[in-house]
């Protein structure tokens, strides 16, 4: 099977990690792919619109299974419910707007994964560094006119 099938076909993705293919699982993967950084309630609403009656608990169960299998990534910005995305397998980070809570991906700013080395590992084998950049998105900055446009982040 071509690699592109594994990134675009939820049935192939589920099979590739040994998960049973079900309508709710396919609908969850499609919903998160269509709306990255969605919370479980938004995913559940999209799944219900796609396949009909599905319990919220079933959606949580599918999200947990897909995160556990490495098909989805769960992020938890402070003050926000858990959010889900299909961008996995890299060590990207996120920009979060303090005003409207918009979340966008930003590639690793420096070096290879992990992007940051702790000053002391205390015996841990560091596999990932999670960085969340907080600020004001361009739309919010434009609406209130109080913030100047933020310069783009560049890699060092």
Image: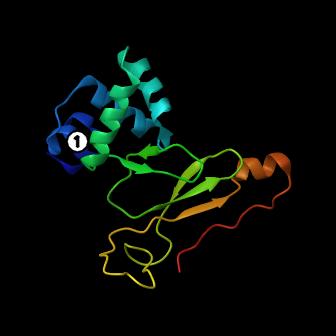
Q: Residue at x 37, y 33 (%)?
A: 60
User: In the figure, is residue 142 to the left or right of 30?
Assistant: right
For the residue pair 21 and 58, the one nearer the viewer reads as: 58
Rendered location of residue 69, percent (x, y):
24, 47
Rendered location of residue 110, percent (x, y):
48, 77
User: In the figure, is residue 69 to the left or right of 37?
Assistant: left
State the quadrant of the N terminus: top left
**Looking at the picture, does residue 52 appear above or below residue 129?**
above
Q: Residue at x 15, y 39 (%)?
A: 15
Rendered location of residue 132, percent (x, y):
55, 61
Residue denoted by label 1: 13
Q: Residue at x 57, y 73 (%)?
A: 154
Q: Residue at x 26, y 36 (%)?
A: 10
Rendered location of residue 107, percent (x, y):
47, 64
User: Within the image, what quadrant is residue 58 found in?
Assistant: top left
**As drawn, which residue projects farthest toward the right?**
145
Q: Is residue 130 visible?
A: yes
Q: Secondary structure at mark 1?
A: helix
**Looking at the picture, does residue 81 appear above or below residue 43?**
below
User: In the figure, is residue 60 to the left or right of 134?
Assistant: left
For the residue pair 2 and 86, the one nearer the viewer reads as: 86
Q: Is residue 35 visible?
A: no
């Amino acid at each position: 099977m071509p690699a592109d099938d594994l990134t675009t076909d939820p049935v192939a993705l589920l099979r590739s990690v040994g998960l049973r293919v079900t309508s709710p699982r396919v609908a969850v993967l499609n919903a998160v792919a269509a709306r990255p950084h969605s919370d479980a309630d938004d995913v559940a609403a999209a799944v219900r619109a796609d396949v009909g009656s599905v319990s919220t608990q079933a959606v949580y169960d599918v999200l947990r299974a897909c995160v556990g299998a490495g098909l989805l990534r769960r992020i938890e910005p402070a003050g926000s419910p858990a959010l889900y995305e299909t961008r996995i397998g890299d060590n990207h980070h996120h920009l979060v707007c303090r005003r409207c809570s918009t979340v966008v991906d930003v590639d690793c700013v420096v070096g290879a994964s992990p992007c940051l080395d702790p000053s002391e590992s205390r015996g841990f084998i560091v596999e990932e560094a999670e960085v969340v950049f907080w600020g004001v998105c361009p739309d919010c900055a434009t609406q209130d006119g109080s913030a100047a446009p933020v310069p783009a982040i560049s890699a060092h």
